[in-house]
Image (spheres, rainbow, N blue to C red):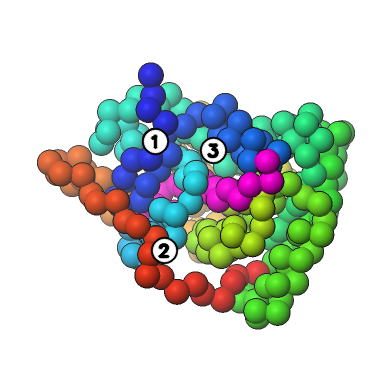
Amino acid sequence: MINRGKYSVLGVEISAIDYEYGVEAIINAAKARSPLAMTALAVHGVMTGFSDPVHRRRLNAFDLVTPDGQPVRWALNWIHGIKLPDRVYGPTLTLKVLEAAAIEGLPVYFYGSKQETLDLLLEKLQIKFPGLKVVGAEPSKFRRLTPQEKQEVVNRINNSGATITFVGLGCPRQEVWVYEYHNHLSMPLMAVGAAFDFHAGTVSQAPSWMQKRGLEWFYRLIQEPGRLWKRYLLLNPMYLTFTFLQMLSISKQPVLKPTGMEPEESYG
């Protein structure tokens, strides 16, 4: 049986959970109107935390950090012997939570991406989940928000009646956003990255056989080589190297506590 705790992968605490556990935790928090910070991390997200101690403390303050990429799941299994059977992929978890929210009548909110992407996303989701209650959606401003703008965002989401907010700002901006807002919004905040684009149909997903073999990064690199080449061709070898070194290490890396950190102005 899997011990559904958190385990260090390069100092970032990853939740060893499956989809069923993740959906249940999020839906229960939504029903209880309780704050819950969640993100799904692939290699890029883990390496961002590994290389930035401040951001690592943010990530380690999250309630759920799911192994979004197969290499992150593999690291959990290799280093800690967990035998997690599958990753918990942000776009798939998004659909599973939306399906449960539609069944339970839980209103949802979408924050991030572009207006045209949101329009396409909501159109397709309403077809897929006819009972889904979408009570708000607003695009990113693609800059830091002022304190007044941040409070206005909090007010809009709170006043909408939403019980779950999906955040699609890209890594690491979306994790910064969730970290800063989760104490102001009594609901689960889900940082789900490219899920908005995938489900809107503006970006195609890798074939399932590539996803299962951990080759999704290669598919995305071919799609956007100019933007992603540094992320994958530099970070992936670094990730494998440091993961191997952690495997060889006798002592596990220390758990970092989210203390002594000044919040930044929020991304929007």
Q: Quadrant of the C terminus?
A: bottom right
Left or right of 44, for residue 175: right
Residue toward you, 261 or 22: 261
Label 3 packing within 10 angstroms: few (<14), some (14-19), many (20+): many
Numbered range of the magenta stretch: 32-47
Kind of residue at badge 3: Tyr
Q: Residue at x 50, y 61 (%)?
A: 172
Judge whether residue 234 can be spotted in this image: no
Which structural element holds mark 1? loop
In reply to whether residue 40 is colored magenta, the answer given is yes
Single out the mark in the foreground, 2 or 3: 2
Name the residue that disc number 3 marks: 89
Kind of residue at badge 2: His
Label 2 packing within 10 angstroms: few (<14), some (14-19), many (20+): many
In reply to whether residue 192 is colored magenta, the answer given is no
Q: Which mark is residue 5?
A: 1
Looking at the image, tell me whether mark 2 or mark 3 is earlier in sequence order: 2
Label 2 vs label 3: CA separation? 21 Å
User: Is 96 located above or below residue 13 in the figure?
Assistant: above
Q: How far across and how far down the image is residue 89, in percent?
A: 54, 38
Q: How far across and how far down the image is residue 29, in percent?
A: 63, 41
User: Is 167 located above or below residue 29 in the figure?
Assistant: below
Name the residue that disc number 2 marks: 55
Kind of residue at badge 1: Gly
Looking at the image, tell me whether mark 3 or mark 1 is earlier in sequence order: 1
Label 2 vs label 1: CA separation? 21 Å
